Amino acid sequence: MNQIVKYENKRKTVEEVLDFIRDGDDLIVPLANGEPVVLLDTIEANAARLNGVRIHQMHALKERRYIWGEYGDHLRHVAYFLSTASRKAYLAGKCELVPNHFHEVPRILRETTKTSLILASASPIDEHGYFSLGTEADYVASFIGKVPFFLEINKNMPRTFGANQVHISQVAGYIEVDYPLHEQREPIITETDRKIASYVAERITNGATLQCGIGAIPNAIIGFLGNHTNLGIHTELLTDGVVELVEQGVVNGVEKVLHPGKIVATFALGSKKLYDFLDENTGVEMQPVDYVNDPRIIGQEDNMVSINATTEVDFLGQCASETIAGRYYSSTGGQADFARGARFAKNGKGFICLHSTTKDEQISRIRPQLTLGSAVTTSKNDVDHIVTEHGVACMRGKSISQRTRELLNIAHPKFRGELAFEARKFGLI
């Protein structure tokens, strides 16, 4: 049977996805633009026909009634990373949140769920019978060939390469849709962000391999790298800033240890410019998160540089990056993966960035102890450099008293006396 015949045989109506769902099933959905909007709309509309079905997902894009638990035990949401679509529901006790390191999500899903069916958005089929998961590989690519996929084929999804190719023989069914991808708004970059970025950029050597997290500070750092040469990319998240560095000739990956000459990522989120850049681009490889984010893999890049943001740091160097004022905001994501991986790397460097105070300058983000209820994302043993607009604190190999003094030096001047008093009270200096 040729590929065209196989393809036509698996074309379904959107309602036929329900034929592949049984009571008690665990459905797995990719994050961000991998989310199959029409399929999920249909499943939600027919929630009363289901029983005990769970949808497992990181970073949902669309706020839905099942995320709010409105269908009772018929259909519920299990989050592995909160977003604007799920944050309020979680804080209201309407859905679950599973703690995780991003690279371990495929294993967690294998060990704790039935992995009944993958529902994913994908690019159109190619002449060889393969779909591409486009902007995604994330945790779902790890299940290709092991779990049936039901795909939502969107002509706007870029065709990307790597280990995110799904053959027609591995697909239970598909539908065809046409809607634009979600575009992430560029964060507003402040002068404080630029100051922090300048400290990080001057510590990045030519030939380094970068991982940049999401947010204004990582974006600002990219803006300071225009005079660097031979940079490489090995990152969980691919953003518009990387496109600019490729166009400038700054990123070419020639000095990378793994996948030289290639940009490696596990998902991409940005503007249409980024999605157009990805389409049919053999210079980019989308790989599963249990490869990209594995600290043992990251550590093989001799000159690995990890750049992430946090909300609070205590005198031990513990970084609370997933809670704000002690309440959950997101989850661990890949920050801890890359902090650990950078420590494994021969010449690795890790940077955790934050403003020294809250926006109104009323609260110091460098604290004697983390706010009650905060979750530690990057541990005191993995932290390397902490950066604020007042400088860089080096944590690696430093005693607690040395760390405390380093952090006092980069705290906002208006809080240094108070923080020093607290440090003395705790016997830290």
Image (tube, rainbow, N blue to C red):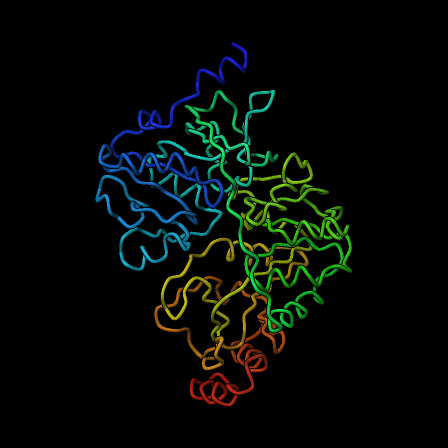
Residue 256 % position (x, y): 71, 47
**Front residue (pair 240, 324):** 240
x 47%, y 46%: residue: 32
Q: Is residue 356 above or below residue 379?
A: below
Residue 153 % position (x, y): 49, 30
x 40%, y 47%: residue: 62
- Judge whether residue 315 can be spotted in this image: no
Specify whether 155 is left or right of 57.
Answer: right
Q: Is residue 228 above or below residue 63?
A: below
x 48%, y 40%: residue: 34
Residue 276 % position (x, y): 63, 41
**Front residue (pair 185, 411):** 185
Specify whether 415 is left or right of 347.
Answer: left
Q: Quadrant of residue 147?
A: top left
Q: Quadrant of residue 208?
A: bottom right
Residue 176 % position (x, y): 47, 28
**Front residue (pair 403, 178):** 178
x 72%, y 47%: residue: 253
Q: Residue furthest front?
A: 179
